[in-house]
Amino acid sequence: MLAATVFDLDETLVDSAGAWQRALGSVAARHGHRWTAEDWAAIQGRSTAFWSGYLADRCPGLTPQRAASACVDVMVAAMAEGRFGLLPGADDLVATAAGLGPVGLVSASPARYVRAVALAFGLLPRLRAVVTGDDVRHGKPAPDPYLLAAHRIGLPPARCLAVEDSAAGIRSAHAAGMTVLAIPSPATALDIDVLRLATHHAVDAYVAAKEIPALVSTRRPAPRSAPPLGR
């Protein structure tokens, strides 16, 4: 039996993809680059270091650090204005997991954004561990973020269930040795090789919340009674 649940944030719990795309496009436009669908596809599920470097490479005079900070400024403002929020069923999903064992959060996004979102949407009090894109040198799809989450929770990765939507995230959690419950994004749903890495699948947070109680529990099974001795 698994004993903890570790969630991805963006597009697993938070409906933020559109806001992130607009933020990246806005910052790129200020520096003379037109952000395209191809640019967006190239950074899906990747670490802060990757996407901020990618953006900086296309915007003369912009460093990765400034690129990340500017995008976070836009995202925090968008959140405050109510432009994105939790996905339907996400709050119940996290609450269900928290009732079964420790809960962690593993995001490729910058720490300032992750903590602002987790606090604003009521997730933070339920979290035993938070790992952001600023905490690891090698982000998703490397196993490092999920290995660090397991360490902070205090359990081996093999006793953790990871809930993920992206190909990079599923690869990361699987490489760390976690059991994966996939709530696939549209792109991930077409990637058969990635989906095979996930032991469990759900179409949305509501279905995932129904599946988790059968997978996660910190309760040890009661010892079986000895059978009566035969005469």
Image (spheres, rainbow, N blue to C red):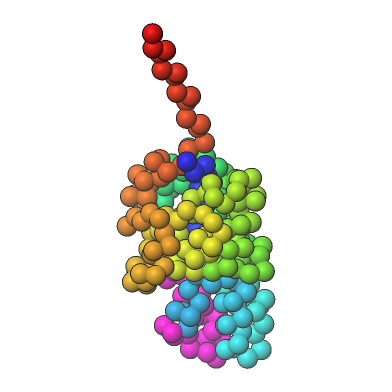
User: In the rendered view, would you say 116 is above or below 49?
Assistant: above
Query: Can the viewer see residue 11 in this picture?
Result: no
Q: Position of residue 206 (x, y in %)?
A: 34, 49
Residue range of the region highlighted in magenta in the rendering: 13-38
Query: Main SS of the magenta segment?
Result: helix
User: In the rendered view, would you say 86 is above or below 30?
Assistant: above
The residue most toward the top is 231
Of residue 128 and residue 189, the one placed in the foreground of this image is 189
Q: Which corner quadrant holds the C terminus?
A: top left
User: In the rendered view, would you say 22 is above or below 184?
Assistant: below
Q: Where is residue 157 in the image (x, y as percent from the top left)?
A: 57, 52
Q: Position of residue 159 (x, y in %)?
A: 53, 46
Of residue 180 and residue 131, the one placed in the foreground of this image is 180
Q: Please indicate whether residue 167 sits to the left or right of residue 51 in the image.
A: left
Query: Can the viewer see residue 138 in this picture?
Result: yes
Residue drawn at (60%, 61%) of the image:
145
Residue drawn at (48%, 24%) of the image:
223
